[in-house]
Image (spheres, helix red, strand yellow):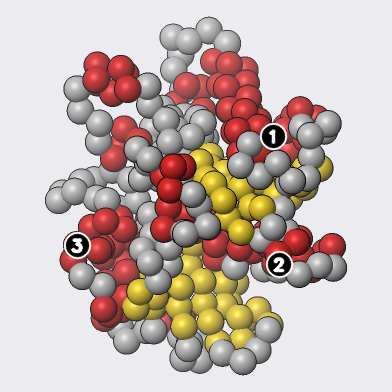
């Protein structure tokens, strides 16, 4: 079997999972800033268990499956959507992708939710972010995990994935093994660090919306504002209620889904898991997306 590697480039950490002959042989997480500052060490780790046959690289908002060596500058700009000199967001991801490809690694870019033919065209109107490439990878892990646990084929998998990342909250609807809808982190509910979808009038009043704007305004920003009375509880209520509303929204596209799978950094938070589970108890079973790695996040698996 081939030796393959998945890379999940998150706001807080960059995670790596490698599989060789069905067994996990790479399983690690770096702080994002540390990994991007020492690309030689990062690249060396990818080769530490032998030369890989395929590397699913950092793909941002995604591209139709493409070898990194064949990707054009325009395609890279569309995948990472970072303007010249833009300091916000996860700086350096496009450079990381270029560096890995230049190092001779068999890197490919993978799609985001918006690239899938299984998602009806009307659900893509006025949207860019229906779920980034790493969120889609987590949904594929969900299909694998649910199919194995329940003993049916991939076409029997139906669920809503809720990705509770270190910055963004996102969701993906899967019906009969096919991704049919998604809510992206920049177009969805409030996240742990990120504001989520901005009211168009808020964007107008702001005058300028930068990448840094998209990565702020979440739970941590609200909690840090000493002028807001009861900020901690208000921020947590907004965060959890937003995720719960998103699940109900996605169930419109996947009415047969009877499970909600929680993934991402905040999925292990006791209050988060408990309150989401209680709120959705009459709708679907809520369970963590466990995967098979010990350290690497679900998107890398």
Q: Residue at x 56, y 90 (%)?
A: 2
Q: Is residue 83 above or below residue 148?
A: above
- Which of disc 3 and disc 2 is earlier in sequence? 3
Please state, as top left, top right, bottom left or bottom right, where the C terminus lies in the image.
bottom right
Q: Residue at x 34, y 78 (%)?
A: 67
The residue pinned by badge 3 equals: 74
The residue pinned by badge 2 equals: 154
SS class of the residue under badge 1? helix
Q: Is residue 177 above or below residue 223?
A: below
SS class of the residue under badge 3? helix
Q: Is residue 138 above or below residue 1?
A: above
The residue pinned by badge 1 equals: 272
Comparing 155 with 110, the one in front is 155
Cα distance, mark 2 to mark 3? 34 Å
Q: Residue at x 43, y 67 (%)?
A: 110
Position in image of residue 225 (x %, y %)? 44, 17
Position in image of residue 116 (x %, y %)? 46, 59
């Amino acid at each position: 079997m081939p030796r393959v590697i998945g890379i999940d480039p998150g706001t807080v950490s960059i995670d790596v999972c490698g599989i060789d002959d069905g067994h996990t042989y790479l399983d690690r997480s770096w702080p994002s800033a540390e990994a991007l500052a020492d690309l030689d060490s990062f690249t060396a780790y990818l080769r530490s268990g032998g030369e890989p046959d395929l590397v699913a690289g950092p793909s941002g908002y995604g591209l139709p499956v493409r070898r990194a060596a064949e990707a054009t500058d325009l395609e890279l700009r569309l995948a990472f959507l970072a303007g010249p000199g833009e300091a916000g967001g996860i700086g350096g991801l496009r450079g990381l992708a270029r560096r890995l490809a230049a190092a001779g690694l068999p890197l490919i870019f993978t799609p985001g939710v918006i690239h899938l033919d299984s998602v009806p065209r009307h659900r893509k109107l006025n949207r860019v972010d229906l779920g980034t490439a790493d969120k889609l990878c987590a949904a594929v892990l969900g299909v694998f995990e649910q199919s194995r646990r329940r003993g049916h084929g991939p076409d029997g998998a139906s669920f809503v994935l809720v990705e509770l990342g270190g910055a963004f909250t996102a969701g993906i609807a899967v019906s009969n093994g096919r991704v049919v809808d998604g809510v992206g982190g920049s177009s969805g509910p409030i996240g742990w660090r990120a504001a989520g979808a901005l009211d168009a009038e808020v964007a107008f009043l702001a005058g300028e919306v930068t990448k840094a704007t998209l990565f702020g305004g979440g739970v941590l920003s609200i909690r840090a504002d000493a002028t807001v009375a009861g900020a901690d509880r208000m921020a947590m209520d907004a965060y959890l209620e937003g995720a719960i509303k998103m699940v109900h929204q996605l169930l419109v596209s996947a009415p047969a889904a009877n499970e909600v799978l929680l993934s991402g950094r905040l999925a292990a938070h006791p209050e988060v898991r408990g309150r989401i589970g209680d709120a959705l108890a009459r709708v679907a079973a809520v369970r963590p997306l466990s995967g098979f790695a010990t350290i690497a996040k679900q998107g890398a698996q």
